[in-house]
Image (cartoon, rainbow, N blue to C red):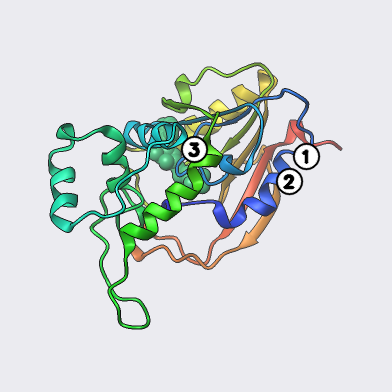
Amino acid sequence: MKYMGSKNRHAKELLPIILKNRRDGQCYVEPFVGGANMIDKVSGWRIGADKHEYLIALLISLSEGWEPPNDMSEKEYQDIKNNMSNYPKELVGFAGFPCSYGAKWFGGYCRGRANNGEARDYIGEAWRNVVQQSIKLQGIDFRAVCFRELILPEQSIIYCDPPYASATKYRDKFDHDDFWRWCREMVNDGHDLFASEYKAPDDFICIWEKQVNSSLTKDTGAKNNIERLFQHRSQIAT
Ligand SMILES: C[S@@+](CC[C@H](N)C(=O)[O-])C[C@H]1O[C@@H](n2cnc3c(N)ncnc32)[C@H](O)[C@@H]1O
C-alpha cells in the first residue's frame, strides 16, 4: 500500500540479503511494519508490528478479507478525521494512510488531475492497491506495539525500518539512540538483525547502499539520500 517511507521499490534488492541465511521455521519479524511493503513479499512465519493502532487495525482487517470502500468524498474523509471514534479503526486507518496526501497520516484529501486532464481517482487507486495486497497479508501475525515491548520468538530474523533520524517527524518523538541500544540487545540475544537508515553508529556496518532521488516533500528534509542497510559488526562473517 502507499505509505510514507515505503520500501516497496527496494524490496527486490533488500530481501535476498536479509533472507539469505534464513533457516527452516525461522521467524521473520518487522517491528516497524508500516504499509507492510516488505513483509508482504516474505513467506512463512511472519510477525509485523507497528506502534500505530489504526494502521495495524487496517492490516489485520485486510489480511482477514475486509474490503474498504472504493469511494470516499472529501466530506466523508474530513468527518472520519474529526470523529475517529465514530468509525471502525480499519476505516480510519484506510482514510488516514493510503487515502491521504503522500500517504502521510491524515496528510490531506487527495485531489487533482491526471495527465489527460481528467480528475484522478486517488481513492480508487488506494482501494485497488490494498485489495491487491490483502491476499499477501494472510497469515501474518500483526501486533500494535512499540518495538521495545515486542516479544519475539528465539533466534528470529529482524528487519527494522524505523523513522529515519533525518526525515520527517512521525506523530511521536522517536529516540534513535534507544533504538540502536535495543538493536544491540537483540543481537546479543541471538537474533539476526538488519536495519535500514541513512546512517548508523560505528558498530553497525553498511552492507548495501543505493542513491535515491526521494520524492519526499520539503518538510521531510530528505532528498537525494543514500539508502543503506546495516548489520552489527559481530554478525558479519569475516
Ligand atoms: C519508515 S516507516 C516503515 C515503512 C515500511 N517499511 C513500508 O515499507 O511500508 C516507519 C514506521 O515506524 C512506526 N513507528 C514509529 N515509532 C515506533 C515505535 N516506537 N515502535 C514501533 N513502530 C514505530 C511508524 O508508525 C511507521 O509505520
Mark identifier at residue 33: 3
Residue 180's quadrant in the figure?
A: top right
Q: Which numbered tag is attached to residue 20?
A: 1
| Residue 198, x across and y down, in percent | 56, 52
Give the amino acid type for the residue marked by disc 2 in the picture: Pro
What separation in Å lies between label 2 and label 1 (alpha carbons)? Answer: 6 Å
Ligand 1 sits in quadrant: top left
Instruction: Identify the residue at horizontal 37%, vertical 37% (top origin).
Output: 58
Residue 164 visible, this angle:
no
**Quick check: marks 2 and 1 in contact, CB under 8 Å?**
yes
In the rendered image, the residue lying farthest to the right is 238
To which quarter of the image does residue 153 belong? Answer: top right
Res. 203 image quadrant: top right
User: Left or right: 47 with respect to 65?
Assistant: right
Give the position of the C terminus as an image quadrant.
top right
Earlier-in-chain disc, 2 versus 3: 2
Q: In the image, is the residue at mark 3 within 8 Å of ligand 1 by its beta carbon?
A: yes
Residue 64 in sight: yes
Query: Measuring 52% from the left and 67% from the top, which residue is drawn there?
Result: 224
**Label 1 environment density (alpha carbons within 10 Å; few <14, some 14–19, many ≥20):** few
Q: Residue at x 28, y 40 (%)?
A: 91
Dot placed on the residue nearer the N-terminal end, 1 or 3: 1
Q: Classify 187 as above or below 15.
A: above
Please tell me the numbered disc located at residue 236. none
What percent of the width, then of the height, locates residue 21? 79, 34
Task: Report the residue marked by disc 2.
Answer: 16
